[in-house]
Amino acid sequence: MSDAPLVEVRNLTVDYVGANTVSRAVNGIDFDIRPGEAFGLAGESGCGKSTVAFALARLTRLPGLVSGGAVRFMGEDVLSFSAERLRRYRWSEVSFVFQSAMNALNPVIKVSEQIEDAILAHRPKASRAETLARAAELFELVGISPRRLDDYPHQFSGGMRQRICIAMALALEPKLIIMDEPTTALDVVVQRDIIEQICELKARFGFSVLFITHDLGLMIEFCDRIGVMYAGELVEVAPAGAILTAPQHPYTRALGRSFPPLSGPRVRLEGIAGSPPSLSALPEGCRFSPRCGEAIPVCMRLAPELRPTPATGGEAACHLLS
Amino acid sequence: MAFLLRRLGFYFGAFFVAITLNFLIPRLMPGDPATRILLSLRGKLRPDQIDAIRKTYGFSGSLWDQYLQYLWRLAHFDFGISTVNFPEPTASLLFYAAGWTLVLVGAATTLSFGIGITMGIWSAWRRGGFFDTFFTPINVMLNAFTPAVVALLLWYAFTMQWPIFPLGRAHEMNLTPGFNLETLLSVAWHAVLPVASIVIVSFGAWHLGMRNTMINLLNEDFVLLAKAKGLSDRRIRNRYVARNAILPQITSLALSIGFVLGGAFITEVVFNYPGLGKFTLNAIQTRDYSFIQAQLILLTMSVLVANLASDVLNVILDPRLRSAGRA
């Protein structure tokens, strides 16, 4: 993994603009996604994970606004793409799998058409036979009979719909697939199948994944590296294993303690006391300090910066580590 | 299919109830029309003449006999003889008038739906843009007018003050009837003001309905995904947003038919247009009983047919309804 990163996110800042207020949903975060890597973004609801994901394809919708920083895809500055370059960049370089397979498909048109129009939008000269053949091929990749191409979304189960979404995401062989809670709406057994399927496809096609979920267990299993977000900031980035075995940041530790281990003795789960701060009333200093059991006086005054953590080979933002 | 059959059964039941009420109500009121005619003739009739008149109107025999007779006549489109245009059968008058009303209602509905939906799509797509901020309030205002007011204004402006458009009749008198260009143009020219009166007050409702449904759909995940797929704006707007937003409008289309018919009735009277509205007003003024009854049945039927048509359209356009029937 010594090659140049596929995606470089630098000091990315996203605001939500109200009538008189500006809420900073993402506050200057930095991370890379390397070719073929599965990078995870973990954190509580509302910490800005999905906002980051949408910003990567400039899909941020009003009142959201990317107000600073840079997103570079293979060295190109995504934030300064022209409308047409952006349209071509979407899906052929970066595709999406959303949480709600139920709502991610247009209910009134055939699934084949929804796959084909993604292809046609980027290869306008493709013939109907070609796009249909590709759609059939994609269906087989995710284990659905191509006979069902002419069906409508409501005729599929939730798991199958998510497979269709994955098939659709693969249509143009993008280099990065952003998966925003791809299995959250599914039951545990189907979740397992879907994740295995994604792993298989990833091994076969070598795309990178930006994986977003609040299920830390699932994420540790699937991802190579994980970034932990809290209140719009990255507090720790580390290899997945290290997040489990040697979490450096108190928040990462707390997050880990709030999930049941898959094996081993029963332990009492601890939640994290309190709730994340409102973006319009952020605490001084470290944003986690009011809920942190280990906070020291400096935490209330000064916001810590990401620093390399030799123990994990990653980075963490905590005064306790310096 | 099962869905449509169920609906069809429902409409048939509704139709039956409607025609039965149409039979019962005049018979529950004191003084049937035959008696009224007899009274107006002040007893100058022989008993066999009285009997003949009662028979003509279907008011002889037991209630049950009358009902069966009524149904039998209805099944043969026999609505009796018009008293005003005696001895013209009511049915032929009715179908003549209904034809012209259909021209008005058909043209007005098509135009107002087409204009309103198109405007709705544009103003939702550029929400808060010039088009939206300019036309949305105007259409809200226009929508608050009644067809009668607009018809009178247009009548005064374009047939009295500036007599651009013709008044009265549905086409020029000296025309060779049939489907030739001259006739069609003349019909269209005569229909301009009546149709405009209805369209002006009704397209705003489609604009607002389509706009609001579109705006709600813009936040759907499948629209975001369509954008993420790199589809063109046009395709997202038409195939993903508008395609879904049109469904509830088609349901409203059936509900609006009553309103449009009411508007047509009034504009026909204002512009002296030979449709159902004008004939019905005549019939009421002259107590042409069989015509009033017949046009009520026709109106009931047309509302039911409009509903059925919107059901069929919805089934064609919404795959979810198709399999709802299968399940």
Image: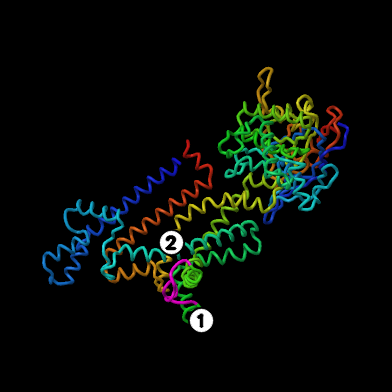
What residue does disc 2 label? B259
Instruction: Tell which subunit mark 1 falls on.
Output: B
Residue closer to the observer: A205 or A212:
A205
What residue does disc 1 label? B162
C-alpha gap between disc 2 and disc 1: 29 Å
Q: Quadrant of residue A149?
A: top right
Q: Are marks 2 and 1 in contact (CB under 8 Å)?
A: no
Q: Position of residue B315 (x, y in %)?
A: 49, 46
Q: Quadrant of the N terminus of chain A?
A: top right
Residue closer to the observer: A216 or B45:
B45
Q: Is residue B178 magenta?
A: yes
Report the magenta stretch's main SS: loop
Q: Is residue B86 left or right of residue A124?
A: left
Taking the spot 62% from the left edge, 64% from the top edge, the residue there is B133
Circle nearer the N terminus (2, 1): 1
Q: Position of residue B138 (x, y in %)?
A: 56, 67
Tell us which disc is closer to us: 2 or 1.
Answer: 1
First to last magenta residue range: B165-179
